[in-house]
Amino acid sequence: MDLTQKFKAKIQSAKRILITTHMMPDADGIGSEIGLCMALKKMGVDAACVNEEGLLERYHYLDPKSIVKPMDAVIKKKTEAFDLCIVVDTNSIERVGNRMYEYLKKYDPKDILFVDHHPAKAALVKEHCIDITAAATGQIVGLMIQALGIKFDKELALPIYTAILIDTSSFRYPTVSGKTHRLIADLLDTGIEAPIAYNGIYGTKKVSHMHLLGTILTSTHSNKSGEIAWITLNNSTLTKFNGDMEDTHAFINHLLVLDNIKVACMFREDGDELKVSLRSGGDIDVGNIARAIGGGGHSHSAATILNIKNKKIDTVISETILKMEDLLKLQK
């Protein structure tokens, strides 16, 4: 049974459908849930997008009709009863936020459907709409919308296009395929202008942002072989340049142009935690590396979180790079 058949089987008897995504969602999760909700409404389905928290202001342009509601606005109403919950861009209900998690735990597992492209256990892949080969969850949603016979218009196409754009780092990851670009062509045919869509999600920048980026890149380090390179972002640097953490996610991608690069890393200070983002510069599976140090993710994009309470950041980073060197040797 393909993904569209699974999807049809799940929604055919549902009267009211809740769509949500993971906590602190990126554009793939947001674009996917908005696009899916719009499509279901076009089919006459009573669907609602509800997240743990409301959307950040920077994402409001993707949702001009305010389709996405914060949990407080919907779930606590006794009149609201959903008989199917669709969770996009994750295959773990633990990631949807504490209050949404408690809400979803009340549901029978058969009344929850994951639509996702992240690595998952075989049993989940079999029962849910999960395709780990897809470039983005937005790609899965877009292709299902097409298969359901729903015609894209500009309003529906924008969140789907943006979801794929952001989760492929502008179509540069190895999961991008001809299938991805054929879908993108159909989305662009609705009248979306690529430069405007790009600027919408990445935003226009101030000079201070360029100074922040320059400062971070100036501090780039690499190991002796040049196969691992990393940058570090701390709170004092962000404060100095009046930076926004949301605008730093793409900084790591600048490392992928380095000679001999296999693994790019970005370490971000966040209180007692050090958030580690990993990107692959080739055929190295950074998902495996992340899992070995307590995280997870895709073969080309992964992350983990390290505890740095009462520890020196430089020491934690040095120890982590040494572990990565050993893990990298196992993949050669």
Image (cartoon, rainbow, N blue to C red):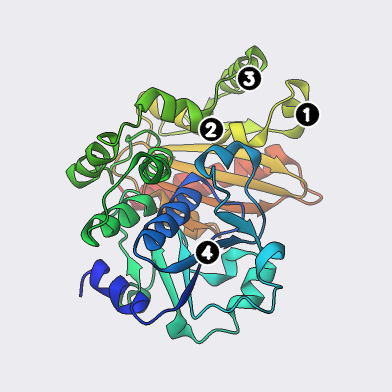
Indicate the position of residue 189 as horizontal and vertical percent values: 25, 35
The label nearer to you, 2 versus 4, is 4
Q: Earlier in the sequence, mark 2 or mark 4?
A: 4
Residue that numbered label 1 is attached to:
236
Whole-percent x, y for residue 232 in the image: 63, 32
Instruction: Check the image and report above or below for 4 versus 257.
Output: below
Density class for disc 3 (Cα within 10 Å; few <14, some 14-19, many ≥20) is some
Residue 219 is situated, as x and y percent measured from the top left of the image, at: 60, 22
Q: Is residue 309 left or right of residue 279?
A: right
Can residue 268 be seen here? The reply is yes
CB contact under 8 Å: marks 3 and 4: no
Q: CA distance from mark 3 to mark 4?
A: 36 Å
Image quarter where the N terminus lies is bottom left
Give x and y (percent) for residue 316.
Answer: 66, 45
Visible residue check, residue 91: no
Precedes in sequence: disc 3 or disc 4: 4
Q: CA distance from mark 3 to mark 2?
A: 19 Å
Q: Which residue does the numbered mark 4 point to in the structure image?
A: 48
Mark 3 or mark 2: which is in front? Answer: 3
Name the residue tied to disc 2: 230
Marks 2 and 1 sit apart, C-alpha to C-alpha, by 18 Å
Q: Quadrant of residue 3?
A: bottom left
Give the amino acid at mark 2. Trp
**Residue 209 marker:** 3
Mark-to-mark CA distance, 1 and 4 = 40 Å
Identity of the amino acid at label 3? His
In this picture, residue 42 sits left or right of residue 242: left
